Image (cartoon, rainbow, N blue to C red):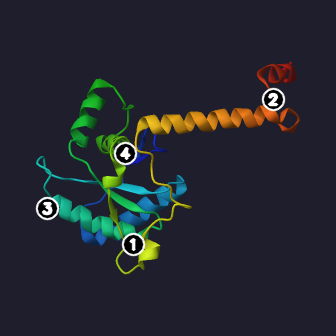
Amino acid sequence: GVALSSGFSPIPLTVVSCNGSKEDFPQVASQICRIALGEGASQIVLGLPLNSSGGEGEQAVVTREFASSLACASQLPVFLWDERFSSAEASMRMNSGRGASAGQTIDAVAAAIILEEFFAGEWATAESICAPGRPAEERAPTTSTHQPPPSSYSDIRRQMQERAVEQQRTALQRPGKGGSTRAGRRAKRR
């Protein structure tokens, strides 16, 4: 499943099919990269299917192989994040009507849940996947182009509120340059 988030309220987008065959990895990775770039993503978070005790099974090994293919195909940083219980949570949300719209698949909703947990959790513990053969300076995202995600929803909300206040201040300081008040906009409409 594919979901999108700016760090706040992830949205399920779509599902990209893969039969788990290594031969499919480059095509699927390319498709995910196109979606990520088209949506203006700054990083890619891939769910790592750990077993209930936190260990890695066969599917986690396949996921790691795909993550390597994705890192090779993408110019964006790729992170692995524990996806335990995300499908069960998605199923519960879809059955209760909470957080899932009609027509969304369980995998897309699970992807949104993975992003919620990534941004709500200690994101610094996410595993960064580096493309093999790239120099170290190319593998590590720079802070100028790829800001790390905020550590919590409260940080995200605070940052959004600060930006909104700053935008309002800027607009009010330049009333003749496109900024306007509600009363001014109402008068223009009449």
Query: What residue would you read off at disc 3?
Result: 58
Q: Nearer the viewer, residue 62 or 174?
A: 174
Q: Is residue 128 visible?
A: yes
Which residue is at 25% across, 35% downward? Answer: 89
Mark sitting earlier along the chain (1/2): 1
What amino acid does circle 2 point to? Ser
Q: Secondary structure at mark 4?
A: helix
Check contact, mark 1 vs mark 2: CB within 8 A: no
What amino acid does circle 4 point to? Leu
Residue 90 is situated, as x and y percent measured from the top left of the image, at 28, 37
Mark sitting earlier along the chain (3/1): 3
Q: Secondary structure at mark 2?
A: loop
Which residue is at 28% across, 72% downward? Answer: 23
Mark sitting earlier along the chain (2/4): 4
Query: What residue would you read off at disc 4?
Result: 115
Query: What residue would you read off at disc 1?
Result: 72
Nearest to the eye among marks 4 and 3: give it. Answer: 4
